[in-house]
Amino acid sequence: MSTDRFSLSADEYLAKHHVLTYLEDAIGQLLEHKEDNPKVNPAKFFNDYFTSIYHGNHTLFREYAFIKSTPHNRASFIRVFWKCYRHIGKNGDLLNVKEYHSLLCLLCPNFPFDLIQKTARIILMDDAMDCLMSFSDFLYAFQLQLYYEEFLEDCNKLYEKLTQAPRSPRETVVVPSSSTSPRQQKKQQPLPPPVDPIPPPEGIDSQQFLEALTQLSDVTKNSHPKLSCLREILQNTNRVSFYGFLMALAKNDSVNSGIGVLPAKASIMDDTEQDHAP
């Protein structure tokens, strides 16, 4: 943060850290609170508000629009979800999409169902609504989907673009004339297609996908994993499917540490894990 103070202008600093977003929300919360408590102390209210933001306790029971409004809010909500429900993982319970959505709605009443569906597809690579998922699998896939939602949408568009195989030029068709002999007509007929054509390989070329993602990372304003993480995943394989790529991101320790709110998967159920602000 100290580097930002000298390298960014005032407007750039405010935008990067979403200071105006929090100021507007704080004022709105104060005015709403004053309706029920006219004697509220504004100075104390603002102190409590920004202390809560610092410690990451400010997203509980808030609307989804506020949760997704800043990366810090998203990270804070991910940590709240983990803290509230990690006993599910300890008990070894397996839940389906609707059950995970119900848990999230207890923390955010209008949490969108489609984001939970997208999370499930990372794990199941399918739309199976009744399939069961472990808490740890869901948690890390949910973290990826919520924190990098816009970037993943851009990745999907790039992937779909790369799957569109270029059209091969059509072969010249010779239309036999009345003067063409039957023997010549037989030679000019196109060969029949092979009986058992070889199916196209699954996924897309990993190197092409990496190059496209590198260009996207240079221009996007959305949060995204570091290029080193993308290279680590894509340089170890020749071809990759979209959901295989997402699963690798969800399991990647460097991606997890870059977000910085969840411990490594091996210690996700550890009671001795120290709390820290996102």
Image (spheres, rainbow, N blue to C red):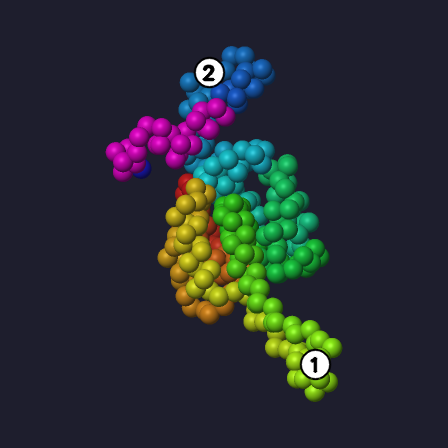
User: Is residue 94 a member of the stretch shown in magenta?
Assistant: no
First-in-chain label (2 vs 1)? 2
Check disc 1: other Cα within 10 Å, few if <14, some if 14-19, many if 20+.
few
What residue lies at 53% left-to-right and 38% top-to-bottom? 68
In percent of width and height, residue 172 lies at 61, 71
Q: Which residue is mark 1?
A: 180
What residue lies at 71% left-to-right and 84% top-to-bottom? 181
Q: Residue furthest bottom?
A: 183
Give the amino acid at mark 2: Asn
Check disc 2: other Cα within 10 Å, few if <14, some if 14-19, many if 20+.
few
- Magenta region, residue range: 3-25
Residue 127's image quarter? bottom right
Side of 13 relative to 243 (left or right): left
| Front one among 92 and 238 | 238
Side of 12 relative to 77 (left or right): left
Q: Is residue 72 above or below residue 116?
A: above
In percent of width and height, residue 239 lies at 50, 68
What residue lies at 54% left-to-right and 33% top-to-bottom? 66
User: Is residue 8 a member of the stretch shown in magenta?
Assistant: yes
Side of 90 relative to 217 (left or right): right
Q: Is residue 50 above or below residue 44?
A: below
What residue lies at 50% left-to-right and 41% top-to-bottom? 74
| Front one among 151 and 247 | 151
Q: Which residue is mark 2?
A: 41
